[in-house]
Amino acid sequence: MTTDPDCLFCKIAVGDIPAEIVARGTHSLAFRDVAPKAPTHVLVIPAEHIGSLAELAADHTELLADLVGVANQVAVDEKLTGGYRVVTNVGPDAGQSVPHLLLHVLGGRGLGWPPG
Ligand SMILES: [Zn+2]
C-alpha cells in the first residue's frame, strides 16, 4: 500500500494525526470534518494514497466499492434517514484542498440543490 509521508490524510490514515474515526472498511476509513459544512459532515478516505477521483484506475474496483460502502455505512450509523449527499472534489477549481481522494458525506436538514 502506498502512502505519502507529507500527506495530511495519509497521516490520519496511519494514526500519526488524531481524528474522530467513525467507521472503517477494508481499504477505507471515515472521520468527522473538523469544520463541518452540514449538521453531519464525515470524510471517507482510502487508506492508500490516491490523489483524487481522477487517479482511479480499473484495478481500484474493490477499493472504490469499499469506499462507497463505508460512506453508506456512515449514513446508516449517523441515522441520515432523510437523505444525504456524497461529494468528491477534484482539483483546486472544485475546492479540493488536500490532494488525497475523499468522499464528503453530508447530511441533515438544509442541504440545498444545487449546492451553494
Ligand atoms: Zn495521502
Image (cartoon, grey):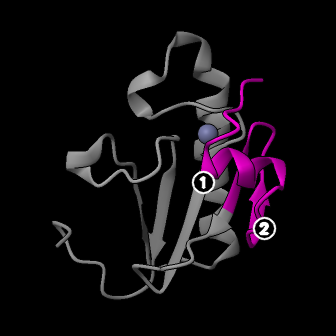
**Where are the magenta residues, as a range?**
1-30
Residues 63 and 109: in front is 63
Q: Residue at x 59, y 21 (%)?
A: 61
Q: Quadrant of ligand 1?
A: top right
Expressed as whole percent of the image width and height from the top left, the position of residue 53 reads 42, 33
Where residue 112 appears, as percent x and y from the top left, is 22, 77
Which is nearer the eye, 77 or 100?
100
Q: Residue at horizontal 84%, vertical 55%?
A: 15
Farthest-out residue, front: 6
Residue 34: image quadrant is bottom right
Q: Position of residue 75 (x, y in %)?
A: 59, 67
Determine whether 65 is above or below 82 in the image.
above
Q: Residue at x 37, y 88 (%)?
A: 109
Say whether residue 19 is magenta: yes
Task: Locate the N terminus by quadrant.
Answer: top right
Task: Give the labeled residue for mark 1.
Answer: 44
- CA neighbours of label 2 inside 10 A, class few (<14), some (14 to 19), many (20+): few
Residue where numbered disc 2 is placed: 18
Quarter where residue 80 is shown: bottom right
- Queried on whether the Cβ of the residue with tag 2 lies below 8 angstroms from ligand 1, the answer reads no
Quadrant of image for the C terminus: bottom left
Is residue 87 located in the magenta-colored stretch of the structure? no
Going by the numbered disc 2, the residue's amino acid type is: Pro
